[in-house]
Image (cartoon, helix red, strand yellow):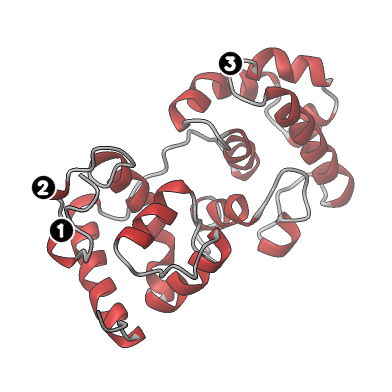
Amino acid sequence: MARESLASKQERAALIEERMYDYYGPGKASLDYRDPFTLTVAVVLSAQCTDAAVNKVTPTLFDAFPTPHAMAQASIPEIEAIIRPLGFYHSKAKSLLGLAQAVVADLGGEIPADIDLMQKLPGVGRKTANCVMCEAFKDPQGIAVDTHVFRIAHRLKLAGPSADTPQKTEDILLKVFPHSQWGYINHQWVHFGREFCRARNPRCADCIVGDLCPTRGQWE
């Protein structure tokens, strides 16, 4: 099969996003949060864990430590006691305490609306920073590539085999989709990945973008 040109991918991506928007609208965050700080905390907790599980513990966590100042004064055992149902709660508790302390000490107690500064915080990588920039600040600087977005980008062949990391996958998606759509992609694709393009037993026959998918039916 001939290699698809970037222009062709952009045309196909435009049709895909049109279908996604018709079906999901701009999308909705799967994680519950109250402000940029609590969203950052929720995204850190969601690593290797379902959003549903995170949403079960965050109300208690946010009530106990609603601000960076409050969490910065907590102990790791206090945080662990609340997030214990989640995977890797030892390391996540350490990250949350370090995150809160860094925000208080270095950033005036506020999560910065700056993707580079955000990534200097403990536990915050590019995916988390992208999520917070898109959702909390409505200022997308990239596309958050989680397991759903990575899987879907490759199944739709918008990203090729050489895009074998989240960063490389994001790089090509930023070329394929215009900036005006960056804030929608993660929200829409997370819901699409749960409803249609599932890791196991995807619903290819019913897929809303099936006719635009070069690998349709290969995953059933």
How many C-alpha atoms fall within 10 Å of the one at disc 3: few (<14), some, or many (≥20)? Answer: few
Residue that label 1 marks: 210
Mark before the other along the chain sequence, 2 or 3 = 3
**Is 66 in front, or is 176?**
176
Q: Secondary structure at mark 3?
A: loop
Examine the rendering and report whether any part of residue 95 can be seen.
yes
Q: Residue at x 64, y 19 (%)?
A: 83
Mark before the other along the chain sequence, 3 or 1 = 3
Examine the rendering and report whether any part of residue 114 can be seen.
no
- Quarter of the image for residue 5 reads bottom left
Q: Quadrant of the C terminus?
A: top left
Q: Which label belongs to residue 45?
A: none
- Quarter of the image for residue 141 reads bottom right
Q: CA distance from mark 2 to mark 3?
A: 35 Å
Residue that label 2 marks: 206
How many C-alpha atoms fall within 10 Å of the one at disc 1: few (<14), some, or many (≥20)? Answer: some
Kind of residue at badge 1:
Gly
Farthest residue to the top: give it: 81
Q: Is residue 59 left or right of residue 111?
A: left
Asked if disc 1 and disc 2 are in contact, CB closer than 8 Å, the reply is: yes
Q: Is residue 116 left or right of residue 106?
A: left
Position in image of residue 52 (x %, y %): 43, 27
Kind of residue at badge 2:
Asp
Q: Residue at x 31, y 59 (%)?
A: 155
Position in image of residue 137 (x %, y %): 55, 56
Position in image of residue 200 (x %, y %): 30, 38
Asked if disc 3 and disc 1 are in contact, CB closer than 8 Å, the reply is: no
Kind of residue at badge 3:
Pro
Residue that label 3 marks: 85
Q: CA distance from mark 3 to mark 1?
A: 37 Å
